[in-house]
Amino acid sequence: MSVPNVTSFYPTFFILVGIPGLQDSQRWVGIVVCLIYIISVIGNMTLVVFISHSHSLHGPMFIFLLLLASNDILLGVSIVPKMLSIFFSGSRLILFDVCLVQMFFLHSFTGIESGLLLAMAFDRYVAICKPLRYSSIVTSRLIVKIIVMLCVRPVVLFVPCILLVKRFKSFKTNIIYHSYCEHMAVVKLADADIRVNSVLGLLVAFTLVGNDLLFISLSYGRIFQAVYRLPSTEARVKAFNTCTPHICVFLSFYTLGIFSFLSHRYGKRIPSYIHIILSDLYLLVPPMINPLMYGMKTKLIREHVWKFLCNIKTCSWR
């Protein structure tokens, strides 16, 4: 199906390999991906429904959590259906423009995810370090500004990357050794100088994820200082427990992201299927973990879910 790379050409479609080196086992990989995706959708949809329909869950932190759950659903929609079609039916072909659209939404949603984790860290910082001024700092107007900025920022930063890919005159091959249309995986196929694209990709990554990780770390540094200054152990445990879900969520997102980035850029001796599996886990695991962490660790959410289940039992008994 692919055009030989002896001469360069401009492809109308790409071929996604899936996981190089594991083509014979991809059906089993597809089963795992499908299970993770189902858990992720159910968990995030549960958060969306309960937060949007419960007035007691309309505080700033829960608004950010609602947006995080919605973003995780959209992130899964942008990549998982095509991945499953590759793993189960061998449908590897993807049109050039569709590939660019997937690339745009994939990186935009991950950028929004990183920004939401920063916004949630800021919310926890104000709640713990400046509790008396919380309502005057974290206002509805500020939340709207944060949401607009989080949506605009990745779009503005990543649109130039898409336009630069579109401007390539020719490609050496149309085979993408990946499970989805990742930016650098596509750029490396171009029969041209890709240094500008590579530098721009790194700049966008450090501008989004690098800055967000830095400010999240600084926020939690101040939070831990404030927590350890509290007079009683009970107060310290209570304050720390309010941050536990967010800590678990951002650690899973950034840890997998950093491992994926380092293995892709510098792990030349690591088998290619390890690179791809890490990249897939980076996008699949955090959306599954997020609702589980917040569902188990957030008392208000647990109470609403338990109340809902009790009402279902009561109705069934009747």
Image: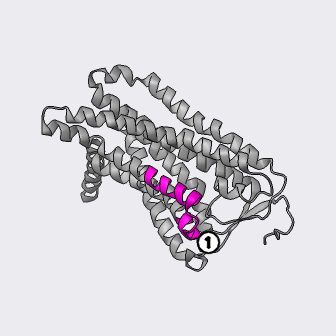
Mark 1: few/some/many CA within 10 Å (<14, 14-19, 20+): many
| Residue 127 drawn above or below residue 68 | above
Task: Tell me the SS state at disc 1.
Answer: loop
Image spot of residue 129 (x, y percent) = 29, 28
In the current view of this chain or complex, which residue is farthest to the bottom? 24
Q: State the residue position of label 1.
A: 20
Q: Is residue 165 left or right of residue 20?
A: right
Image spot of residue 254 (x, y percent) = 45, 50
Q: How is colour applied across the structure in the image?
A: one colour
In the image, residue 169 lies in the stretch drawn in magenta: no
Image spot of residue 292 (x, y percent) = 35, 54
The residue shown at (56%, 68%) is 269
The residue shown at (26%, 34%) is 225
The residue shown at (68%, 50%) is 101
Q: Quadrant of the N terminus?
A: bottom right
Residues 214 and 252: in front is 214
Q: Quadrant of the C terminus?
A: bottom left
Which range is magenta?
253-277
Q: Is residue 15 left or right of residue 231?
A: right
Secondary structure mainly formed by the magenta segment: helix
